[in-house]
Image: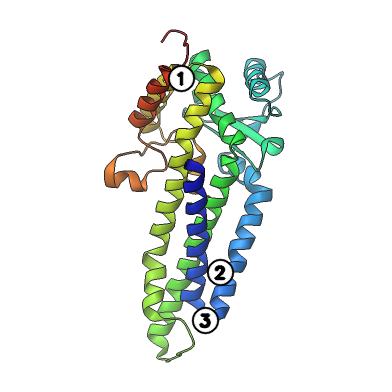
Amino acid sequence: MNQIKTFVLLALLSALLVAIGYLIFGGTTGIMIGIVMAAITNLGSWFFSDKIALSAYHAQPVSPEQAPSLHAMLERLSQRARIPTPALYVVPSPTANAFATGRDPQHAAVAVTEGIVNLLSKEELEGVIAHELSHIINRDTLTQAVAATIAGAISSLAYMAQWTSFGMAYGGRDNRNGPNPLGLLLAVFLAPIAASIIQMGISRAREFEADAGSARLTGNPRALARALQKLEMGARQMPIQGNPAFEPLLIINSFSGSGLANLFSTHPSTEARIQRLLELEQTMPLSGF
């Protein structure tokens, strides 16, 4: 169900990009511009999503000699998941967080901050890394990167629409074949908001599945639940610095809520994630809390 929801949301993002092209440039030209931009952003995300995300958070590669225990943990969990061991990166930040990136398991990377390594116990850190590996297995890393890139393109087009609308307002020209002024206003004010809501919806749908994947991979959902509690507190006190477009990649975000506020959150509420993990606990043998 989550996969269907994700596909529908990605299709809506691409359609929104095409619609904005039409609103800004008008006619078939605008539609073609939107289609071309959607194709370029999707291809760009396919080939360069890992490099862009790692650069956004200044992640640095670490060798087995530099971090032997982390490498051993990542390799053990990857073997259990039956995927190639991803490249390991460390983000030089005291903030506790982690993310995965890459277009497929053969071109993937897992990044952890210095803060998360210092904050969590071994079992909790295993739960976090297993969560990130689940994102890689499910191709969520590519999906989220594509969503972030399309949302960024929509924001750029909306910025263009702002200047186009100013030109129409002060140019005094009536171009029936050109863009509709009302459509331009919608593109400027509503499109970026709609794109953000759709992008965040994609992220929330995938987080629940990755949590469940971590529980299955480690056999210890309560360890991840415990880690999420610690990460939630840490993220509120010290948010990670980076490009906001890539916040959906992170395992935890400082802003999460319920109801209307949840529309603008990149992640489900930590309470909801923990509740699902504890419900899953009832279906498998666990180590102690």
Nearest the viewer among 63 and 283 is: 283
Q: At label 2, which amino acid type do we have?
A: Gly
Image point 45% across, 67% down: which residue? 158
Residue 132: horizontal and vertical position, in percent?
56, 31
Q: Nearer the viewer, residue 118 or 135?
A: 135
Instruction: Tell me where residue 143 appears, x and y as whole percent.
Output: 56, 46
Q: Which residue does the numbered mark 1 point to in the structure image?
A: 221
Q: Does the residue at mark 2 contact the one at mark 1 (Cβ under 8 Å)? A: no
Q: Residue 27, labelled with which disc? A: 3
Q: Residue furthest top?
A: 288
Find residue 16 and report its horizontal and vertical position in percent. Answer: 47, 64
- Label 3 secondary element: helix
Q: CA distance from mark 2 to mark 1?
A: 43 Å
Q: CA distance from mark 1 to mark 3?
A: 53 Å
Residue for point 61% across, 34% down:
137
Residue depicted at 61% across the width and 31% down the height: 110
Furthest-left residue in this view: 259
Q: Quadrant of residue 40?
A: bottom right
The picture places residue 261, in percent across and down from the top left corner, at 30, 45
Q: Is residue 171 above or below residue 164?
A: below
Read off the residue under disc 2: 34
Cβ–Cβ under 8 Å for marks 1 and 3: no
Three-letter amino acid code at the position of disc 1: Pro
